[in-house]
Image: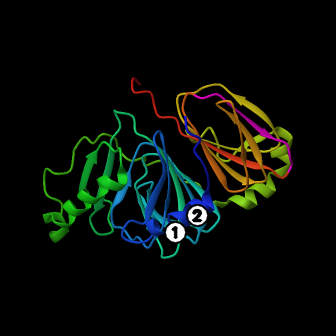
Amino acid sequence: MSIQLCNINQWIEDNKASFLPPVCNKLMHEKQLKVFFVGGPNQRKDFHIEEGEELFYMKKGSMELIVQEQGAFKTVAIQEGQVFLLPGKIPHSPQRKDDTIGLVVERERAKQELDCLRYFVNDSTESLFERWFYCDDLGVQLVPVIKEFFASEQCKTGRPVPGTIPENPHFHPDGQLQLENPFNLKEWLQSHRTEIHQNGKKNLFDGAKYKSDVIIYGKGVDEFKPIQHEIWLWQLEGESVVKLNGQDITLKSDDSLLIPAGEEHQLMRDADSCFLMSVAMPTPNENI
């Protein structure tokens, strides 16, 4: 097993050409967890819908995420340094600016899950064109669907073609949920610093509202038995030591490490200046 340790700032610098048009994104990890960074500019008309959650963090600059919330369109502005967890089944359309870099983390799809790419009629919530598909590489799979739309009658006329919109789609968007607001990660760390170091950890998002486990670890030691999904670690401040596969791996500020599925590991943080983020997004059991 190779150790997937990298410094995020250096990784972004090494891959800076990937964040310019027309590509604008680069995957850091692409197995159970999809960890990638996105540049710009990228102005889109399409809306993406998936069953899993998406974690957004703006490392440089700001972005807008247009969402459909409770049946109406809304713009979620994510500023530099802010974090936002998008629930599943929410139509969303990222709008990114020039000279920006954002982190996105999402999970692989279970075999029974389908994604949807949807266009709406003007500014209404009526579906103009949509395609449902099993998503294993969104960056590759979006392009032919977008090309299909621009060559379609719906694109030319602005009207849906009867019989092309499923009457019984794989799932309906969540029309009841009210989204939480993005917030500044560093400010959140400062306001919860004492609590985190006293208790050893704190959830960044309410575990009762979300399926993802995004945990901030402070001073302490934690041991983990093997699990069936990956964990992505990001050293926000200070240093940590990760015991993995018989090795001691030191994480310094802005280092990241992917813990493979099925691997036990230990996290050791011995200073009050340490903050370590852990991101886990379990893929649903296919038998459910």
Region in magenta: 263-272
Q: Which numbered disc covers residue 58? A: 2
Identify the image's colour scheme: rainbow, by chain, secondary structure or one colour: rainbow
Magenta includes 269?
yes
Q: Position of residue 195 (x, y in %)?
A: 83, 45
Q: Residue at x 20, y 67 (%)?
A: 150
Q: Is 88 situated left or right of 115 in this image?
A: right
Q: Residue at x 47, y 39 (%)?
A: 32
Q: Is label 2 or label 1 in front?
A: 2
Q: Position of residue 74 (x, y in %)?
A: 47, 64
Q: Which numbered disc covers residue 227? A: none
Give the position of the C terminus as an image quadrant.
top left
Task: Name which residue type carries label 2.
Answer: Met
Q: Position of residue 19 (x, y in %)?
A: 46, 67
Query: Can residue 127 be seen by looking at this rendering?
Result: no
Q: Is 118 situated left or right of 226 in this image?
A: left
Q: Residue at x 34, y 33 (%)?
A: 112
Give the position of the N terminus as an image quadrant.
top right
Total numbered badges shown on the rendered structure = 2
Q: Which residue is labeled 1 in the image?
A: 63
Magenta includes 76?
no
Q: Position of residue 110 (x, y in %)?
A: 39, 34
Q: Residue at x 26, y 65 (%)?
A: 121
Q: Nearer the viewer, residue 275 or 89?
A: 275
Secondary element at image label 1: strand
Residue 147: quarter of image: bottom left
